[in-house]
Image: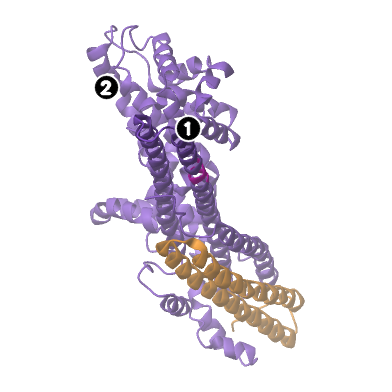
Amino acid sequence: VGNVGGDPSRMTGGAAALHKAAAAVSSAHTAIGSDGARAAGAAGDPTLAAALSRFAAAWSTMLVDTGTQLRAASQLAANAAQDLATAGGH
Amino acid sequence: MGFELPPGDPDAIQSALNSWASVAADLKTQESATQSGFAAALGTWTGARADDFRAVSAGLQLQVHEAQATIEETAAQLRNYAAVLRNAIEEIKHLQSLANARQASADTQTNKLPAGSTQIDEIQQHAAMYVGSLMQQAETLRQNVRKAAEATAGVVDAGTSVVVPAAQHLTPAEIARRVDQSTGVVGIQQAINGNSLTADQAWAALNSAAKEVPGKAVNPDGSINWEELSKELTEVEQEEAENPAKKALDGALDLWTLSTAPPSGWALARLAEAARNFHNAESALPPDLARLNAAALDRPTISMSPDELLDSIERDMSRLTPADEAAFAANADVSEATESLLRNGLPASADWLVKGSVALGAIGDVWTLADPHSATDDKVDAGLNAVGLAATTETGTTLITGGLEATGLIAADATVGWVPVVGWGLVAGTAGYELWKHREAVGNFVTHTVPNFVTNTVPHAVSGAVHAVGSFVSDHIPHVHLW
């Protein structure tokens, strides 16, 4: 049995906080991507511009993925809280 | 060669960076929110799944922290590049205006002269020489921009390597695919959006995060125990240090770290380099003094330690008055650069480095200042180069010689022999200043960023640098009282 005990209310609160953080982290990818492209275009040096494009690609993707992982973690916590609540809490 | 402006738009770069800085600030907030969210979920949750979730918690917190720190530091480096670019553009425009004015003046003068006057060629030649020297200055500024761009590109790539090592030859699309592969979230976004994500899919998507932080370094509430993580890193380093094969790779990895480590690692690597320079300077100073004795000094031995030497320089250079310093103001650029250096954060305890450098900078170009370290250091390099230039003036040279005579280091008639002493002193001063300047980066790296490398591909290389700087800081910094 994976879940032995826990306070469903507190766990649900934690899941909600993670869900909110997930959305914020994911949304940051837009600025990193678009402003990275803008900085690359304005850099004036091809080597630096290419490095900025790579950076923007890496971190915008990483932010989306981290946000997705936080969403998954949020859902797991919420599910565990639900299971424990169904089983009678604590 | 002319007055062509370097390509690039510093205002547009700055605007983009402001947005990145805002993202970094928000990620800082989310780092805290993530920590408290996991702590709430794990506060009462028990069982095997809770333990799995705890490992996931630390890994995801590390990912958010890495994103925040890397974006913030990369933005800071790019801001420096934008400043170098902006300065070069403004300076070259100014140089061109000077050239135009000089040529116009020459034309006005020659138009007043009778045709065939020998003065016409002379005036025009002088004007051409002047304009040529301005063009050379413009070319130097363009070169500085190119060097800054190259150094900044290295820092940016180092930031990319945090998530995708050795990405320099990959396209952005390939990089994005590699990130997706490493995180393992491919395909689950749709399931999340459709509210059909299964527990197995969720755990699979969190598998990579769960492996990011060793169990020993995870607190009960799912946060990261940074101290324990650093300890783990040290243990890895010690184990590897005992392995001859690993040891043999250290040198190469150190070099590799310089070009690929994340920004904090880059800063630390620079510090390690400065620390080595400082150590070399200290180690080599007495023998150099001994050689100097034989060649140019009256004294048979010099009993001063390197620290005593620096202290004596500080004492004697403190005799410089504002009037003395004003003597260097004949060259407006020198004056401006020196003031800039002072305005930008020299503490009172390091003020002597500026004054000392006025004296010590005479051969600065021959020693450490010939090759500016990076865009980050432009301001310092410019300042030290400027005071170095100042010291080549007659007044400066007199002060140098007078100062060193007063310390008893050179005989009154010595004119050349002090050069090695000055050189080593400058190396030491520059390295010490570098360490002081980056002290916050060192602290941040050791307490926060170092642990991020536990699962990195070069933990031993970075930890080697940490060890080097740690030893240096504990062994030397308190002694020389730089902060």
Q: Is residue B167 left or right of residue A66?
A: left
Q: Is residue B454 visible?
A: no
Query: Which residues fall within the magenta stretch?
Result: B94-98
Q: Is residue B97 magenta?
A: yes
Q: Determine crowd level at label 1: few under 14, some 14-19, many 20+ residues with C-alpha closer than 10 A.
A: some
Picture residue at 41% right of the left edge, 64% below the top: A46
Prevailing SS of the magenta stretch: helix
Residue B103 image position (x, y, % from top left): 46, 40
Which of the chains is purple?
A: B
Q: Which residue is mark 1?
A: B477
Q: Which residue is mark 2?
A: B287
Give above or below for B90 relative to B58.
Answer: above
Q: Amino acid at mark 1?
A: Ile
Q: CA distance from mark 2 to mark 1?
A: 22 Å
- For the residue pair B453 and B377, the one nearer the viewer reads as B377
Residue B131 image position (x, y, % from top left): 41, 40
Q: Amino acid at mark 2?
A: Pro
* Marked residue nearer the N-terminal end (2 or 1): 2
At numbered mark 1, what does the secondary structure look like: helix, strand or loop?
A: helix
Chain at tag 2: B
* Residue B301 circle label: none
At numbered mark 2, what does the secondary structure look like: helix, strand or loop?
A: helix
Location of residue B402 (image quadrant): top left
Q: Is residue A54 magenta?
A: no
Which of the chains is orange?
A: A
Q: Is residue B80 visible?
A: yes
Picture residue at 70% right of the left edge, 69% below the top: B40
Q: Determine crowd level at label 2: few under 14, some 14-19, many 20+ residues with C-alpha closer than 10 A.
A: few
Chain at tag 1: B
Q: Nearer the viewer, mark 2 or mark 1?
A: 2
Residue A86 image position (x, y, % from top left): 73, 88
Picture residue at 32% right of the left edge, 18% below the top: B418
